[in-house]
């Protein structure tokens, strides 16, 4: 829904960029991870099953979608720990370097091509 401050549901995300905001606070750009097959394969990256298992995610196929990102101050109110109340479970782990670089580089290119959106969330 347009204009919403929070997403419609909790979902894992891939952090693709971090930066320092104008207020000197760390900010992150995250891309959603979804089970829905992508409509634009050029802007989606399937997460290998072994990686999903290592990260503690489910066994269903999942993709990182590089067409719409969220930007927010870290840590922010949109973060949800995998285990309720345990802030150490906010981050599941790292994507393999080669996959991470492909996702990050494609997202940055998509922004330049105006094929991706960056949405500012509540700080």
Image (cartoon, rainbow, N blue to C red):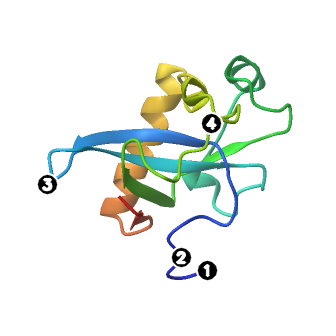
Mark 1 vs 2: CB contact within 8 A = yes
Q: Is residue 69 positioned above or below 11 on the image?
A: below
Residue at the outermost bottom position: 2
Query: Which tag, 4 or 1, sits closer to the chain's start?
Result: 1
The quarter of the image holding the C terminus is: bottom left
Disc 3 to disc 2, how far (Cα)?
Answer: 23 Å
Q: Which mark is residue 4?
A: 2
**Could you classify mark 1 by the number of other residues whose Cα lies within 10 Å: few (under 14), some (14-19), or many (20 or more)?**
few
Q: Which mark is residue 1?
A: 1
Query: Which tag, 2 or 4, sits closer to the chain's start?
Result: 2
What's the residue at 76%, 21% (across, down)? 53
> Where does residue 37 sit, x and y in percent of width and height?
77, 55
What's the residue at 54%, 82% (across, down)? 2
> Disc 2 vs disc 4: which is toward the camera?
4
The residue that label 4 is drawn on is 81
> Hey, which quadrant is residue 58 in on the image?
top right
> Which secondary structure, mark 4?
loop
Residue 80 vs residue 27: left or right? right
The residue that label 3 is drawn on is 22
> Disc 3 vs disc 4: which is toward the camera?
4
What's the residue at 85%, 38% (across, down)? 60
Residue 13 vs residue 115: left or right? right
> Disc 1 vs disc 2: which is toward the camera?
2
- Considering depth in this image, is 24 or 38 the residue closer to the camera? 24
> Which secondary structure, mark 1?
loop
**Could you classify mark 2 by the number of other residues whose Cα lies within 10 Å: few (under 14), some (14-19), or many (20 or more)?**
few
> Where does residue 12 sit, x and y in percent of width and height?
64, 43
């Amino acid at each position: 829904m347009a204009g919403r401050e929070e997403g419609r549901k909790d979902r894992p995300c891939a952090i693709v960029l971090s930066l320092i905001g104008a207020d000197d606070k760390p900010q992150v750009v995250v891309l959603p991870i979804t089970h829905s097959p992508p409509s634009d394969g050029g802007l989606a990256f399937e997460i290998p099953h072994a990686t999903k298992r290592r990260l503690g995610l489910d066994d269903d196929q999942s993709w990182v979608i590089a067409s719409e990102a969220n930007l927010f101050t870290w840590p922010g109110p949109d973060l949800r720990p995998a285990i309720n109340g345990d802030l150490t479970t906010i981050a599941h782990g790292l994507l393999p370097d080669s996959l991470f670089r492909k996702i990050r580089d494609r997202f940055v290119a998509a922004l330049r091509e105006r094929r991706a959106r960056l949405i500012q969330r509540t700080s």
